Amino acid sequence: MNPTRLRYPLLSMSATALAGAVAAGTAFAAPPEALLAAARQEGQLTVIALPHDWCGYGPMIADFQKKYGIKINELNPDAGSGDELEAIKANKGNKGPQAPDVIDVGLSFGPSAKAAGLLQPYKVATWKSIPDASKDAEGYWYGDYYGVLAFEVNADMIDKAPTDWSDLLKPEYKNAVSLAGDPRSANQAIQGVYAAGLSQTRGDPGKADQAGLKFFADLNKRGNFVPVIGKAASLAQGTTPIIVRWDYNALADRDTLKGNPKVQVIVPKTGVVAGVYVQAISAYAPHPNAAKLWMEYLYSDEGQIGWLNGYCHPMRYNELVGGKKVPQALLDKLPPAQSYKNAVFPTLQQQDATKETVTRHWDEVVGANVK
C-alpha cells in the first residue's frame, strides 16, 4: 500500500467518542469450525495493496498462512484504493489469481464500492467493538486502523523539538519544516495544511483551509518552510529535519533509520487530524470463506496487535489497552495515548472543500513550489 494513498475519512468523530465505542467490544473467539473447514477447502486467499512494510502486514500475512495453512496470493502491493476497486471490476467473472478477495481502502471508498455493488457483507465476531461511525450498518465495510498527522524530527539537528503547530513559526526552525508531499496534489500534504489551520482556528473546521494556507504562507515568509517533499532520506540528510506526515510512516522511519539520525515523533497538542482505512470483501471473491477467515483474524486480538506493531492504531485499540492485552514494550514505542484523545476525523465534505481550496490557491497564497 503506497504511503501516498488517499485517505478520505467519512464521518467526523473525536478520538474520545471512538474510545467509548471501542470499549463496548467483546473478546475475540476462535472462528467457527465450519468457516475454518470451508476456508481450508478453498486453500487460498488473494489480497491486494498490502506491502510488507505497511502497518505490520508482512508478519501478519506470514502468521495467517502458518496459523491456518492457507496460501496468500499477493497482488500489486503498491496499488492505491482506486486501483483496488478497479481490480474487482476488471475481474468480476474471473475466478483466477488476478481477482482480489479482500480490499483495504480509504474510508470514502467503502461507501462508493458498496453503491457500485462491488462488496459483500460480513460481520466479524468483534463487530460490536467497531465504532458505528466507522462501519456500514449492514456489514459491507468496516474501519480497521487509523493514524494522525505528526512531526517527524531529526533530533540530531533539532535540539528542542516542536510540540505544536505554532512552534514551527519560531526562528530556531529556519529552513527546517517540510510536508510529505506536494500540497497541490498529495492528500497527506493537503491534510497537513488543514491540520495547521485547524490548530490556528481553535478547532473550527469551517475556516481551517484558509487558515492553513495563511499559516504556510507565514512559514514560507519566515524562511522556515522547505519546499522539498520530505522523506526518510531527506530527513537523514538534514534537508528536511522536520516533516509533517502520518505518525505510522514517521514511526516506521524511526525504526528503519536505526538511530542514524535519532528520530522523534511528536503528535501536536492541537490540530490533531486523523485518517482511517476500512476492510471489505469483494462481491466476486473467488475464496469468500478464506476472506471471512482473514477478517476474523484481522479483528482478533492477534490481528489488531499486528497492526499496532506496524504503528497503525487498530479500531479496538482502547479495548485492548484497557484489557492489558498490549505488551508494554509496544506501548513504550508509541506516542503517549493521551496525544490522540482530541484527534478529529474530518468529514468527507470538509476534506473535499480543503482539497479544492489548497490545490487552487497554494501558489498564489504560499508561493512555494514543492518538489
Image (cartoon, grey):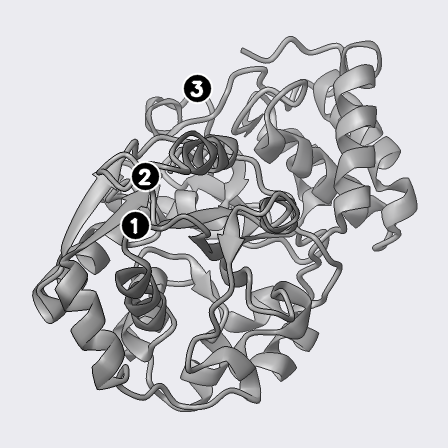
Q: Earlier in the sequence, mark 3 or mark 1?
A: 3
Give the vertical position of 319 relative to 137 (above or below).
below
Say if residue 253 shows up in the picture: yes
Residue under the image location 74 percent in, 39 percent down:
194
Residue located 84% across and 41% down the image: 208
Q: Quadrant of residue 206?
A: top right
Mark 3 secondary-structure assignment: loop
Q: Give the residue pinned by disc 1.
A: 286
Res. 207 image quadrant: top right
Q: Amino acid at mark 2?
A: Ala
Q: Measure the alpha-carbon separation of dots 2 and 3.
A: 42 Å
Image quadrant in which you'd find residue 202: bottom right
Marks 2 and 1, how far apart in space? 7 Å
Above or below residue 99? Residue 329 is: below
Q: Position of residue 283 (x, y in %)?
A: 46, 51
Q: Are marks 2 and 1 in contact (CB under 8 Å)?
A: yes
Instruction: Give the amino acid type for the residue marked by disc 3 in the picture.
Output: Thr
Residue mark closest to the camera, 3 vs 1: 1
Q: Which residue is mark 3?
A: 239
Q: Is residue 224 left or right of residue 101?
A: right
Q: Which mark is residue 99?
A: 2
**Left or right position of 292 against 124:** left
Residue 124, position as x, y percentages in the image: 43, 75
